[in-house]
Image (tube, rainbow, N blue to C red):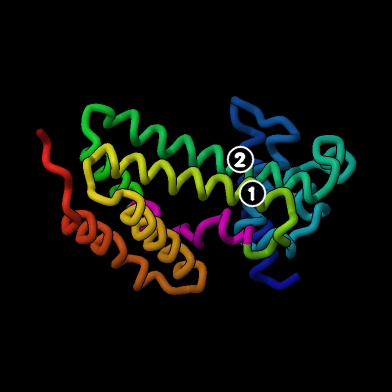
Amino acid sequence: MSTAREKDLRSAVELVAVAEDSPASKSPRERILLAARELFYRHGVHAVGVETIAETALTNKMTLYRHFRSKDDLIVAYVQQLASEGDDVLHRILAENVDSPQKQVAAWVDYVEDVLTNKLERGCALANAAVELDAAHPARAVIEAYKQRKHDRLVGLFRAARYRNPDLLADEVFLLFEGARISIQCGGKGPALRVVGMLRGLLASRPQVPRD
């Protein structure tokens, strides 16, 4: 294992150890998912073995396999957790600004800005995983369903904000955000950091249906 990889592994071990020592102690399953999440995001789902995950989670392979029948099952649980959190984020943004669809749109763009400027951002974890997985892998279906759900909710958001042709606008906005995260994954934050301005410009330029 390379020095950089060893450093990453030590960092992940420390992360799980902190969680274990906290007042709300994590269960073995939670620690395994936490370790898998950290390692899969840093190194990819194929590069990390179950032994490394178990070691990072401060447990052993036998315990890991009691909670997850296989590494594939763990990958599915990993992407399900990410998808659920993504759903929760959008739900929170909409709920906090329920009085105004325009405020909901603005809050979502602010969220996009927070994501793209986060120094820990390494691209979309779900997209990263999808690239590595075969089309028939059960985790792919979870990822694809989440991405479709995200797109459909943007359509609904833009329709509520009275944009003309909300489906086309959602396509354009979705591709800008997803493309920016892929750009970051490939090692360049420069273009991605310009996306928020592009999004705001795009939304400002699109016609809206006048109120009666």
Give the vertical position of 22 relative to 42 (above or below).
Answer: above
Q: Badge 1, how many Cα within 10 Å: few under 14, some, many 20+?
A: many
Q: Which residue is identified by label 2?
A: 81
Q: Position of residue 108 (x, y in %)?
A: 32, 45
Mark 1–mark 2 CB contact (< 8 Å): yes
Q: Residue furthest right?
A: 62
Residue 98 visible somewhere in the drawing: yes
Q: Residue at x 70, y 45 (%)?
A: 76
Quadrant location, the C terminus: top left
Q: CA distance from mark 1 to mark 2?
A: 9 Å
Q: Badge 2, how many Cα within 10 Å: few under 14, some, many 20+?
A: some
Q: Residue at x 24, y 62 (%)?
A: 197
Q: Earlier in the sequence, mark 1 or mark 2?
A: 1
Q: Position of residue 4 (x, y in %)?
A: 64, 69
Q: Position of residue 179 (x, y in %)?
A: 43, 65
Q: Is residue 125 magenta?
A: yes
* Res. 67 image quadrant: top right
Give the vertical position of 90 relative to 42 (above or below).
Answer: above
Q: Residue at x 65, y 63 (%)?
A: 43
Left or right: 85 with respect to 11? left
Q: Is residue 135 magenta?
A: no
Q: Which residue is identified by label 1?
A: 37
Residue 7 visible somewhere in the drawing: no
Q: Position of residue 89 (x, y in %)?
A: 43, 38
Q: Amino acid at mark 1?
A: Arg
Give the vertical position of 178 relative to 74 (above or below).
Answer: below
Q: Amino acid at mark 2?
A: Gln
Left or right: 3 with respect to 127? right
- The part of the chain drawn in magenta is 114-130
Q: Nearer the viewer, mark 1 or mark 2?
A: 2
Quick one: SS at disc 2? helix
